[in-house]
Image: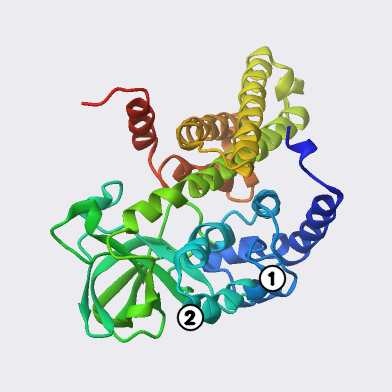
Amino acid sequence: MLAELYGEEHHIFRESFRRFVAREVTPHAAAWEEARQVPRDLWLKMGQEGFLCPWVPEEHGGLGLDFLYSLIINEELIRGDGFGVGVPLHSDVASPYLASYGTPQAKERWLPGCVSGEVITAVGFSEPGAGSDLAAIRATALKDGGHYVINGQKTFITNGFVADLVVVACKTDPAAGYSGISLILVDKDAPGFARGQKLHKMGGHMQDTAELFFEDCRVPAWHLLGHEGQGFKYMMEKLQQERLEVCIKCQVMAEECLKEGLNYAKTRQVFGQPVGLHQANAFRLAEMATEVEMGRVFLEALIAAHLAGQDVVQRVSMGKYWLGEMVNRVAYQALQLHGGYGYMEEYRICRLYRDVRALSIFAGTSEIMKLIISRNLGLRG
């Protein structure tokens, strides 16, 4: 389905980025996992090659390319063991808020850096007491002359330790629920802004995840994105693409898990024959391959609809739910095929298994996705 949308330029771009990943990411992935951090110079190298925010218009230093280029980057990073590199979040989740809702001054100041790698972005939405329930956020941003004064805390922030610019969800009207939420840009050097401890996660080790603190943090009023009280609306407008990004991750990770399981099943000998020739394992692999193929077909239909400008919130919610659960099933079965070796860190399936677990949690849990789906079916309490 997507093959019809790819042009020669897309194929050239994919080959170029694949070579970049093989040279600059894959050989270092294990060390970055150990350090729990991707070095800053990788971002600069990606920026120099045009691999960051490729959709940004030329007037702000970008290439003005379509979403298929972002898809290529996401896919090839995962295939090259760069799942934990926070580039997709920077390029296709955080930076679009700046491009869509930022003031001309904000765009001029930061968008070129988002493209070059000199500015790394993050989104600060989740709080210790507010994850899925965004109306429950407690961070406030109160107007004080020509500034906003922010107080509060954020957690589970991807790119939190390296971010130069954070899109922060705050209550500009603490009594107004969803309609009191606004989005404000916070620069790393803003007075009153601090980073807490680096969070130690089950998987995605090379991806830094941090707590952020705001104590009388003062930012100029022109850091407001769009209008006061419209933050929740803006988040809903951007969530379609964010969740589509997660769907892409789920699908490619499932394909990689299947590949690892199949390769092992063909080469590992048990009771005088390859593991995969035992009927139970052959059937298991057949089931995995079927689910992975179904996922690919559904994902490509979603991407095509998104590129066409269609509202696919319902289908993206279905994709986020089903693909998030599917990749966990496939990873489990692929590791099981490896037996004890699947539990060893030197086997790639071990890291894949750890990394996929979060895919049914972040950007909306499976349960939240099912809630959205059911409400769109007319099932409202």
Gap in Å between the C-alphas at discs 2 and 1?
Answer: 16 Å
| Residue identified by numbered label 1 | 58
Q: Earlier in the sequence, mark 2 or mark 1?
A: 1
Q: Is residue 37 left or right of residue 366?
A: right
What residue do we see at 59% from left, 39% from top? 342
Foreground pick, 230 / 292: 230
Q: Secondary structure at mark 2?
A: helix
* Viewer can see residue 364: yes
Q: How is the image coloured?
A: rainbow
User: Which quadrant of the figure contains the C terminus?
Assistant: top left
Q: Which mark is residue 105?
A: 2
Q: Position of residue 182 (x, y in %)?
A: 30, 63
**Numbered-mark total:** 2
Q: Is residue 380 left or right of residue 297?
A: left
Answer with the quarter of the image where residue 137 lies. Answer: bottom left
Q: Amino acid at mark 1?
A: Glu
What residue do we see at 25% from left, 58% from top? 128
Foreground pick, 347 / 123: 123
Contact between marks 2 and 1 (CB within 8 A): the answer is no
User: Within 10 Å of the Cα at label 1, are there few (<14), some (14-19), or many (20+) other Cα atoms?
Assistant: few
Answer with the quarter of the image where residue 223 lies. Answer: bottom left
Q: Secondary structure at mark 1?
A: helix
* Viewer can see residue 344: no
- From the viewer's perspective, is residue 76 above or below residue 337? below
Q: Is residue 304 left or right of residue 19?
A: left
- From the viewer's perspective, is residue 85 above or below residue 374? below
Answer with the quarter of the image where residue 211 lies. Answer: bottom left
Q: Which mark is residue 240?
A: none
User: Within 10 Å of the Cα at label 2, are there few (<14), some (14-19), or many (20+) other Cα atoms?
Assistant: few
Q: Amino acid at mark 2?
A: Gln
User: Which quadrant of the figure contains the N terminus?
Assistant: top right
